[in-house]
Image (tube, rainbow, N blue to C red):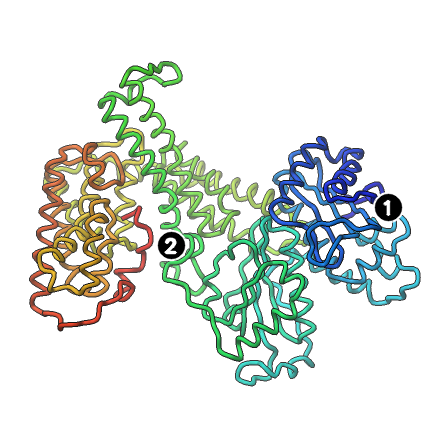
């Protein structure tokens, strides 16, 4: 912090009477030193941050702060008010005001300043020394850490305060990572009478802190909880979910914890990791102001056996479900790939539908139309068709980079995005296509994960996420894609395209059968998604081949069969189904018509040995007929709502109807062989085989 605050940025006689006036007075000092280029613009950014949540803290502290494009370098200004200024704290006005400014985009620099300051503000000797400081230079030295509180207070005699300040600074310099487990003195292990089971070990708590901007309050709450934990003789480890990302607590640490504290004003990320434990859930300021009470509360809940509810299967974002520790590499790989596919699918859907509408409005020659920048006539239908086609083509240009970027994201979180997107863009440049995107994403994620394992000196940690990791990982991924593996992948992509183009007759029908079986095997699960990804990869270009569009049509047709068949079966033979299943059957009409295979999951979960084989039989029939009828589909989703955009639409519907009839007949026959007992309790949709429910939360990739 040595270059962030100087004596010129300190006002020990701040005369402002409002928080706006205080911010202006301190900001003017920044302007005078050339650290803020536009006073009014910067103050507007400060006010916008203040509007999110008051920055006043108990103990007479105000910490207005923001990131702004008008800031040239991270800067901290300090003011001391004799009368006090209202910053919204519950205990009254603030007499110590810290204005923190960071350049736009400088998340890590901003966090470094604020987390360091925030942790020092939890030390009463530090704040007392600031109140007693006799000159601006001494106050600035205190804040920088150049001078200890004991040295600043002439008569304090606090011999050990330097060690306290040094420990706080060392903790901040280490990045305040959530992997640092605090040591607990041996003599405290016997002082935890409420330890579950009476074990001679301290009570263990894991905590998460976060605030709207992920900056000051996040780290102040962490410091406050850690200090209270030491005072209470418990082991307490905090995960600070700041605005520059966060490091997840070790799963083993969470598993061994006796309780959990959430001190947050924004949703806790990856919250399902903490399910099933005694939990206290409060706002971030409670973590700052009353940490001892929170520790007592969570210990009391543990003694009573109160635990939080378990997270539903598949809860969280795709990234939060990807690659958890303890899973096999095969499972992790599938989740990483499906993460990329799940983020890619909306681009496929939007781009594909726009292109399909462009063809429907402007005809099949619309792809040869000139750019609408050069020629667009508001009164001509062809111009509107060309506009839709060209917007869709632009959307399709993002497919491979998004796929690669989010595969890497699933592996390495935010640091994986840059090399992933770069690798995906290179894949397009070298014509490696969809396969190149898969490889680029996996390589990028692996490279970032490898870099993150390297031990980095504390002084460099602040620039790792924004400079070092993107630079090194992008260079490595770019080299591998351009020089080493790009050409073989491009050749493999070309070979796959040629194979699809060469499909005809029996071979095409066999492929349709295989895709139909896959689409209906696990109804939205991994096998279903492999078939869907194969189909969307074929049409993920501006001008796909007829064979690729036939594959897409077969996949969508087969995916519509199971829910439609279950809906029909519950209509014609309702006595074979429970009341709950009959209600689900009504919804299955809409889900099936919309190409959401998951509409059949409640039925498959309740009776997998009858429903799944029947669904697969109908899907195979539909897939084969769709290929035999030469039905084509340019859009990757939509069900019956995109029938006007389908080639040979009537025969496409015939293929679906045939499959629905086959599945319905088989289900009725199989269930009729084992009539359910009268009054049988409805089976919950969540029960059943893993195959039927493992990946049922993403209907878009039905």
Residue 77 percent across, percent down from the top left: 77, 44
Residue 402, quarter of picture: top left
For disc 2, the marked residue is 335
Horizontal side of 286 relative to 416 (left or right) equals: right
Compared with 297, 199 (above or below) is below
Q: Residue furthest right?
A: 155
Q: Residue at x 87, y 47 (%)?
A: 136
How many callouts does the rendering have?
A: 2
The nearer-to-camera label among 2 and 1 is: 1
Q: Residue at x 72, y 33 (%)?
A: 39
Q: Which mark is residue 13?
A: 1
Label 1: element kind:
loop
Horizontal side of 575 relative to 303 (left or right) equals: left
Residue 561 percent across, percent down from the top left: 17, 49
Residue 609 percent across, percent down from the top left: 17, 65
Horizontal side of 546 relative to 15 (left or right) equals: left
Horizontal side of 534 relative to 256 (left or right) equals: left
**Residue placed most toward the observer, 135 or 181:** 135
Residues at circles 2 and 1 in contact by the CB criterion of under 8 Å: no
Q: CA distance from mark 2 to mark 1?
A: 58 Å
Q: Is residue 169 visible?
A: no
Residue 242 percent across, percent down from the top left: 59, 52
Q: Residue at x 23, y 35 (%)?
A: 498
Label 2: element kind:
helix
């Amino acid at each position: 912090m040595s270059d962030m605050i100087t004596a010129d940025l300190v006002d020990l006689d701040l005369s402002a009477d409002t928080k706006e006036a205080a911010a202006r007075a301190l900001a003017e000092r920044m302007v005078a030193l050339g650290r803020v280029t536009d006073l009014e613009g910067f103050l507007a950014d400060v006010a916008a941050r203040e509007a999110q949540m008051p920055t006043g803290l108990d103990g007479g502290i105000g910490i207005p702060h923001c990131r702004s494009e008008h800031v040239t370098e991270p800067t901290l200004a300090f003011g001391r008010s004799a009368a006090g200024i209202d910053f919204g704290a519950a205990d009254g006005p603030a007499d110590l005001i810290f204005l923190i400014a960071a350049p736009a985009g400088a998340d890590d620099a901003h966090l470094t300043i604020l987390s360091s300051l925030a942790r020092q503000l939890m030390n009463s000797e530090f704040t007392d020394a600031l109140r007693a400081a006799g000159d601006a230079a001494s106050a600035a030295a205190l804040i920088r850490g150049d001078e200890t509180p004991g040295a600043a207070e002439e008569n304090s005699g606090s011999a050990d305060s330097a060690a306290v300040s040094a420990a706080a600074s060392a903790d901040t310099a280490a990045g305040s990572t959530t992997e640092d487990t605090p040591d607990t003195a041996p003599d405290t292990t016997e002082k935890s009478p409420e330890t579950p089971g009476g074990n001679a070990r301290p009570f263990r708590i894991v905590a998460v802190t976060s605030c709207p901007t992920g900056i000051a309050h996040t780290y102040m709450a962490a410091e406050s909880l850690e200090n209270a934990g030491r005072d209470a003789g418990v082991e307490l480890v905090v995960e600070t979910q700041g605005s520059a990302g966060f490091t997840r607590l070790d799963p083993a640490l969470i598993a061994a914890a006796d309780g959990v504290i959430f001190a947050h004003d924004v949703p806790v990320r990856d919250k399902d990791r903490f399910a099933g434990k005694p939990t206290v859930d409060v706002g971030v300021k409670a973590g700052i102001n009353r940490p001892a009470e929170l520790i007592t509360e969570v210990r009391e809940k543990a003694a009573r056996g109160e635990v939080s509810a378990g997270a539903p299967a598949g809860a969280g974002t795709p990234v939060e479900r990807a690659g958890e520790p303890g899973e096999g590499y095969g499972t992790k790989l599938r989740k990483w790939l499906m993460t990329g596919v799940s983020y890619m699918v909306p681009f496929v859907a939007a781009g594909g539908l726009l292109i399909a509408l462009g063809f429907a409005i402007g005809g099949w020659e619309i792809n040869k139309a000139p750019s609408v920048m050069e020629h667009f006539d508001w009164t001509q239908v062809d111009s509107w068709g060309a506009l839709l086609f060209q917007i869709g083509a632009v959307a399709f240009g993002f497919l491979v980079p998004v796929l690669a970027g989010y595969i890497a994201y699933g592996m390495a979180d935010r640091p994986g995005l840059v090399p992933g997107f770069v690798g995906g863009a290179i894949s397009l440049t070298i014509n490696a296509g969809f396969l190149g995107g898969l490889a680029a994403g996996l390589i990028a994620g692996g490279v970032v994960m490898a870099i993150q394992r390297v031990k980095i000196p504390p002084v460099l940690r602040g620039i790792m996420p924004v400079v070092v990791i993107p630079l090194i990982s992008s260079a490595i991924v770019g080299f591998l894609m351009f020089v080493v593996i790009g050409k073989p992948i491009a050749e493999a992509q070309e070979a796959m395209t040629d194979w699809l183009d060469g499909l005809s007759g029996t071979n095409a029908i066999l492929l349709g059968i295989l895709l139909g079986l896959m689409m209906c095997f696990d109804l939205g699960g991994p096998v279903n998604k492999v078939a869907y990804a194969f189909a969307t990869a074929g049409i993920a270009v501006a001008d796909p081949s007829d064979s690729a569009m036939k594959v897409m049509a077969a996949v969508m047709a087969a995916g519509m069969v199971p829910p439609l068949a279950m809906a029909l079966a519950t209509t014609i033979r309702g006595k074979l189904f429970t009341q709950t299943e009959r209600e689900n059957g009504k919804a299955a009409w809409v889900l099936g018509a919309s190409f959401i295979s998951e509409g059949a999951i409640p039925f498959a979960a309740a009776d997998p040995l009858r429903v799944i084989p029947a669904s697969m039989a109908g899907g195979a029939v539909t897939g084969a007929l769709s290929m035999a009828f030469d039905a084509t589909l340019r859009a990757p989703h939509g069900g019956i709502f995109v029938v006007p955009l389908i080639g040979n639409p009537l025969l496409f519907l015939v293929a679906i109807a045939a499959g629905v009839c086959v599945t319905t007949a088989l289900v009725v026959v199989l269930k009729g062989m084992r009539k359910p007992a009268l009054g049988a309790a409805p089976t919950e949709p969540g029960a059943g085989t893993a195959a039927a429910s493992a990946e049922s939360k993403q209907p878009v990739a039905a």
